[in-house]
Amino acid sequence: MFKGSIVAIVTPFKNGVVDEEKLRELVEFQIAGGTDAIVPCGTTGESSTLDYEEHDRVIEIVVQQVNKRVPVIAGTGSNSTREAIEMTEHAKQLGADGALLVTPYYNKPTQEGLYRHYMAVADAVALPQILYNVPGRTGVNLLPETVARLAEHKNIVAIKEATGSLQQASEVLALCGDKIDVLCGDDFITFPMMACGAKGVISVVANIMPKEVAALVDAFFAGKMEEARQWHLKLLKISNAMFIESNPVPVKTAVGLMGKCSDEVRLPLATMAAANKEKLVAVMKEYKLI
């Protein structure tokens, strides 16, 4: 259902509030660059520090600006199942085409708890839903066997697999077959994960290089494996640079350096350390982004 180059879009701030004008401009930059779908309010969109009103407003702006040109997949995950249901329902009412739900963080639920959480949301809201497994940030790993159980639900259509493990992604693919799509959650392994069967990537790098990330994915789908492999290698250095500090600090800094919005982040995130910014600037100059 959702495939290709999908951007986890940053949320631009100006003097502590959402910069709605810049957000609309970023949406246009993505669509012009060939991005296949847009995810507002993901980790990269600093969802954890948006209040509920801001969260809904960011989704609303993206839905309005996109105007049905590409799918909008709203980040609606929470470590409270009740909140996740409420936010997913709000996203549906606002016109989102799907929802991305991160595994409940901090609680450290069992696999049975994770299963019941996702089933509760899927039962409550008739909207295509993408599981989001990123144990490095949440403290819990959604295991392939649990994904296979969840794949039986008609509203659960995909998983963003961000363990960085090709083995785990392969196990999900082997267990689930065509019952659920797998999307890569780590830019630095998009090509090898697609070789295993992933249908695309939910990308951080696409915030600054949408055409290039789309080119990799499009080449793969066109059967141009050598071209896709070359894009994979070309993008590796910038992909790594996006994680020299906690996401989204590097990508927000990069977007700022490109003049597309402020590099402002919300506490407890802090602006990039000077030494790391120097490294990022050097890499961006290599790619002729600045």
Image (cartoon, grey):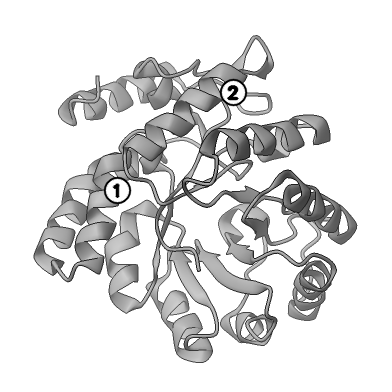
Q: Percent x, y for residue 155?
A: 68, 73
Badge 2 marks a residue whose secondary structure is loop
Q: Percent x, y for residue 98?
A: 63, 58
Question: In the rendered image, which residue does mark 2 sit on?
Answer: 265
Residue drawn at x 18%, y 25% is 288
The image quadrant of residue 269 is top right
Q: Nearer the viewer, residue 252 or 138?
A: 252
Residue drawn at x 40%, y 37% is 30
| Residue furthest left in the image | 226
The answer to whether residue 182 is above or below residue 177 is above
The image quadrant of residue 57 is top right
Q: Is disc 2 in contact with disc 1, using a CB cutoff of under 8 Å?
A: no
Q: Is residue 258 left or right of residue 151?
A: left
Residue drawn at x 46%, y 58% is 185
The amino acid type, in three-letter code, at marker 2 is Val
Residue drawn at x 76%, y 67% is 126
Instruction: Tell me how far mark 2 sits from mark 1, CA to CA.
Output: 24 Å
Quarter occupied by the C terminus? top left
Q: Is residue 24 left or right of residue 150?
A: left
The answer to whether residue 18 is above or below residue 198 is above
The amino acid type, in three-letter code, at marker 1 is Val
| CA neighbours of label 1 inside 10 A, class few (<14), some (14 to 19), many (20+) | many
The image quadrant of residue 199 is bottom left
Q: Percent x, y for residue 45?
A: 59, 37
Numbered marks: total: 2
Q: Nearer the viewer, residue 163 or 160?
A: 160
Question: In the rendered image, which residue does mark 1 sit on?
Answer: 213
